[in-house]
Amino acid sequence: MSGLAMPKPDAGTLRKRAEIVADMRIIVPGEGVVDTATEMRAFESDGLTAYRQLPLVVVLPETVAQVSRVLKYCNERNIRVVPRGSGTSLSGGALPLEDAVLLVMSRFNRILAIDYPNRVVVAQPGVTNLGITTAVEHEGFYYAPDPSSQIACSIGGNVAENSGGVHCLKYGLTANNVLGIQMVLMNGEVVRLGGSHLDQEGYDLLGVMTGSEGLLGVVTEVTVRILKKPETARALLIGFPTSEQGGQCVADIIGAGIIPGGMEMMDRPAIHAAEDFVHAGYPLDVEALLIVELDGPSVEVDHLIGLVEAIAYRNGSTTCRISQSEQERLSFWAGRKAAFPAVGRISPDYYCMDGTIPRKELPRVLAGMRDLSEKYGLGVANVFHAGDGNLHPLILYDANVPGELDKAERFGADILRLCVEVGGVLTGEHGVGVEKRDLMPEMFNQVDLDQQMRVKCAFDPSHLLNPGKVFPQLRRCAELGRMHVHRGQVAFPDIPRF
Amino acid sequence: MTTFTPCTPAEVLSTIQWAAAEESPLEILGHGSKRGIGRPLQTEHTLDLSTLTGVTLYEPAELVLSARAGTPLTEVEKLLAENGQQFAFEPMDYGPLLGGEPGKGTLGGVLASNLSGPRRLKAGAARDHILGISAVSGRGEAFKSGGRVVKNVTGYDLSKLMAGSWGTLAVLTDVTFKVLPAAETEVTLAIRGLLDDAAVAAMALALGSSAEVSSAAHLPERIAARVAAGHLGSDAATLLRVEGFGPSVVYRAEALRNLLSKAGPLQEIAGEASKAIWRDIRDCAPFADGAAGPVWRVSMPPSEAHHMVMALRMQAAVDAFYDWQGGLVWLSMREDDPEAELLRGLIRKYGGGHATLARASASHRAALPVFEPQPPHLAALSARVKAEFDPKHILNPGRMAPTSSSATLPQSTEGAAP
């Protein structure tokens, strides 16, 4: 990945930069165009900081009409565009291109409507994920998907990435909580998908837009479902001598018909790093630590805590603490929530992976990771959304040691290959972006990828919107559209018929 | 006139490759239980998937089930029930409404028509539970999307695109769904005698509480008697379902009683009686009367739909009842005229949404847009998506929207062109 190939910059566009910047200032007057290298530096990377690139120009529109005009202008002149929300992507989804306009949606920062009877909020895409909850929490409502970057990440970016969070086993991903969007296509057309009602008429284009990583259109408005906050939440902190026992405990909890609000697992290196950092009171003599959070009415939570505790003991837990206060519940989470910075303390750099596996394969994947860790000579700590099988291995390396970043990336790629091998996927919630782009063939064959790219062709036939992301190799739409069958050459199928 | 009955995905592939090469349109069928929805097709050949069956993977602890697309829904639901699990989205059975037998329908059909039920409010529709698919496009290419794990953002979600595509983009050969534990117990609280607007207010109040109401429906007077073999009686019934673990259900039902004590007389219905009510609401039993008059399925913002219905009543004779907190309206027209333009105009006036002509004569379905027509830019985008999957228009041509190159359909006003 260090040798990441991005689309070759268009010399014509680069030559016309001054003219393009001037035209952008006409479309977006005032402070909305940034073109000096110093000021553009703030936008040169997203959460995947290993990659940096200054864009052609940064444009920060304020109205849907401006977005439409910028895209139409670029479409007509074959200029590439990279959309960006808050820039918290961990997969390089908002990595700029040298010859592309960086379209930053941060000035779309207003809540447009709060509708309690229909339990929806309509927000502009630059509103933060947490900002939606903040707007409705005085009435006891909240927006359920809670990616760990929720204080900063934008709701438009959440749609682009189909963001998850620790509560998505019970409450769903972004795709399950968004009812409608307004978006602008690369040709400048403005379309609405869904609304405050359920299900979209016609094809589920809203479903395809969610998680399309900014390649299909630019979201300009989002309608989300809000929920009433559960009456209470309590957590159990359970330690196991082996990861197998922890994994079996998770399977038994679900087997008992319990879907916890959150269910997180950490392995020994992650437990130790977190405990050293925040002193959450984690047991240090266990191989796997499970946090199970139950939410709802207290009578339900109390009932389920009893069941989960019994399941934990049956699976050989050596320690099981039950939160007796809100403060104690938060202390259980403190270590887990600080896991990434905690690992950052014990290693100069770390590289966060995001595979998903069938849960039962956890012991096999952890064992495989230990072997790989030995092979590459790099440490690895694991945090795991245990309920839904989403694994975040943190590979420890030092970027100042020549060759280590490359080694860490190869280690990471091997982990993701292992995830796919056991029936899992390359990315559970961080997106493909540029980071996992070249691994896509591990999961999809060329026919699969071609069909995905054809969807792209229906939205953006010239591949101008966020090129170089998601797909390892872009194929021209004209070529993809060709049918390779000819009359008479396919035999009449020899299959049962009446 | 040939009916192909493939037993393997490879046979589906070769059939479609042949049809693509011959540019010979196919009607795509499972059990045909929803064949009466959409524009009537006049294809020469039929691709019948009812012999492409079998559960290929079921791991209860992993909450996942995969099956061939032609596997009967009832068979899968039985298997899930044996393991204390279910499809949480509660797929409805169109059979009785459309004059067919109950208990038909395939898993592929569940996804292709994006089925759901009264639990749609809390648990979503088929689109929210599909994890992965294998399919053959109209280009004659076998492709896959998604996987077998819940959390997956690898590539575009083509599985969701299949939801509600009514067999017009690709022929599903395999589907993988998320499955969930069935609720241990359920209770329904009925408020009696409310008019539509009071009912909608009561449902909004209930859904805005922390009682985790999983379904909310309103059956106006006369309609109430048409569910659960008449056990509810004929007074209007506003129904709230609470599901979960025993102690929690008791507590939440009590909380709802307190919350709604002033709304009207309350009644509690438990166990099988509760299940029977929701099954009938799910399957639109009040209008499954053996008749063939026009029935609409309308989705709107929950607090707006009854205003639309009131306005409609001033100009047309209709029976109506509400699911999804008021947001799903089933409308039965008493006359033969579906009044499509009037209805769709009123939907736009009262907050937007969409209407599907769920039941109508073939002549009405040929003459009127069965599915909600889209604004020009969106219709053009949908047509481009269709063309990328099925450029020769060989899969259920014209069922959802007319296609210019389709041999089976007249040109229409339901603009597929920009």
Image (spheres, coloured by chain):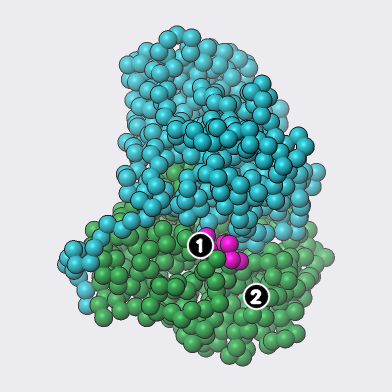
Chain colours: A cyan, B green
Extent of the magenta region: B375-381
What residue is drawn where x is 67% and y is 81%?
A: B342
Could you tell me the amino acid type at mark 1?
Answer: Ser
The image quadrant that residue A404 belongs to is top left
Residue kind at label 2, given as amino acid type? Arg
- Tag 2, which secondary structure? helix
In x, y percent, where is residue A315? 44, 32
Residue A240, can we see it?
no
Left or right of B411? Residue A25 is: right
Please tell me which residue is depicted at 76% across the width and 52% down the height of the picture: A113
| In-front residue for pair A149/A93 | A93
* Dot in front, 1 or 2: 1
Q: The C terminus of chain A appears in which quarter of the rendering?
A: bottom left
- Name the residue beneath numbered marker 1: B382
B379 in the magenta segment: yes
Distance Cα–Cα, label 1 vs label 2: 20 Å
Q: Secondary structure at mark 1?
A: helix
Q: Earlier in the sequence, mark 1 or mark 2?
A: 2
Which residue lies at the image location 62% right of the left edge and 38% below the top edge?
A20
Q: Position of residue B179 (x, y in %)?
A: 45, 52
User: What residue sits right under mark 2 in the picture?
Assistant: B344
Looking at the image, which is closer to me, A160 or B312? A160
